[in-house]
Amino acid sequence: MGTQGDILIVIHGPGLGRDVPTGDVFMDRVRETDPAFAARIRFHETGSPAPDLSGVSLVAFWLGDPLKEKYPACFADAAGIAKAAREAGIRVLNNPEALSNTTKTRQSAIWYQERLPSARARNVNRPSDLEQVCKELGGTCIVRSDVEHAQRDVTIIRKEADARRAARECAFPVAVIQLYDIRAEYRAAGANPSSLFTRYHHKARAFVFGDAVMPSHLFFAPDLVVGLSNCLLKREARPRRRVGHQLGYHRKLLGDMIREDLAYFDSDPLYARTLAQGVRALGLDFAAVDYSIRPDGSVIMWEANPYFYLPRGEQSVLSAERNAVERVNQSLDWMAANLRAAAAGAQNVPDLMRAS
Ligand SMILES: Nc1ncnc2c1ncn2[C@@H]1O[C@H](COP(=O)(O)OP(=O)(O)O)[C@@H](O)[C@H]1O
Ligand SMILES: [Mg+2]
């Protein structure tokens, strides 16, 4: 069973990939809460000689995605390590091959095939094909890179003229993704007009580890494409806004947003299974899933991030109001518990969500 075996986490060597703080935040917490477990975790950097796998009971790949497309050298290293691990009968988490299933179009094809709720996407190589593909995907689309994250260079197509302009201005190839306006769905369903879901666009994020799901955050924004940089929590965290809140401006909005986000963190949603199926369908063992909640309570998944950004709770937006330190610690403890269970050979990681 190798219960007390080591855990090898494969990370990018210096300068070989994008760096996210998550690993350091995680390790600091594990060192504090379970030093014996921390001592069993080793790191291997891509670009260095193949690791010694003796005494290892689990290999986890913590590498930027889509791996093959963005970091081919790291992919080659990682694939070699995964092969050696499999041959030695060592369990692998987030197989390097699966780390390439997160291009926008491949992810969409897999989820569509598995009948998981998501947007259809197509790869378009030639500007002259763009207008037709947009039409085939329903006329309203998102045009963006197939491989980049973090909402970079996203173009929204609502009419033919937008498609023609995108054909002239975008760098091809592009991914064209069917657009779903979830806020419009709330409005059409006659949802309460004062609800944040009716007034703004939203996106939720949850961590998935095997069958276990843990909510992370719920953001609202005036724009369709919601991310940390444009969400209202970020706007309301600006110093001038904070002065405004003391004078009463946007205080209700701030309070409502924080309440929704806190309630989301404490929720145990019925759709958790869908998120877990989404991650598993991509061949992944853990990921942070971005999605939206529809007026009927079901979800539509936007993406799975196997290499996710998680800052320290102190650095979270509106940290104190959102109880972020405690929340991030709970998330890290949950991840550590899942990793520990996986290293002990548990096939079905128990739902350790709120064991405490
Ligand atoms: N098909 C879609 N229809 C409507 N909004 C979308 C769609 N796909 C993504 N979004 C919005 O864009 C945001 C960013 O998209 P996402 O797929 O998470 O990519 P990334 O975070 O890598 O840029 C999502 O959080 C969501 O708000
Ligand atoms: Mg995202």
Image (cartoon, helix red, strand yellow):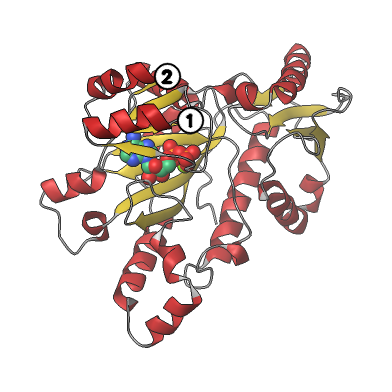
- Can see residue 69? yes
- Name the residue that disc number 1 marks: 145
- How far from the left and from the top, in percent, is residue 212? 49, 39
Q: Quadrant location of residue 197?
A: bottom left
284 relative to 138 in the view: left or right: right
Mark 2 is on which residue type? Ile
> Can you tell which mark lies on residue 209?
none
Q: Is residue 193 left or right of residue 286?
A: left
Q: Quadrant of residue 126?
A: top left
- Residue 349 appearing in the image: no
- Of the pair 128 and 173, the residue shown nearer to us: 128
Q: Residue at x 40, y 24 (%)?
A: 108
Q: Mark 2 highlights which residue? A: 110
- Up-down relation of residue 23 to residue 101 (above or below): below
Q: Position of residue 290 (x, y in %)?
A: 43, 41
User: Residue placed at 62% from the left, 52% from the top?
Assistant: 333
Q: Is residue 224 above or below residue 250?
A: above
Residue type at the position of mark 1:
Ser
Label 2: how many Cα within 10 Å (few below 14, some 14–19, many 20+): some
Asked if marks 1 and 2 touch (Cβ < 8 Å), the reply is no
**In the image, farthest residue toward the bottom:** 247
Ligand 1 lies in which image quarter? top left
Specify which label sits upstream in the sequence, 1 or 2.
2
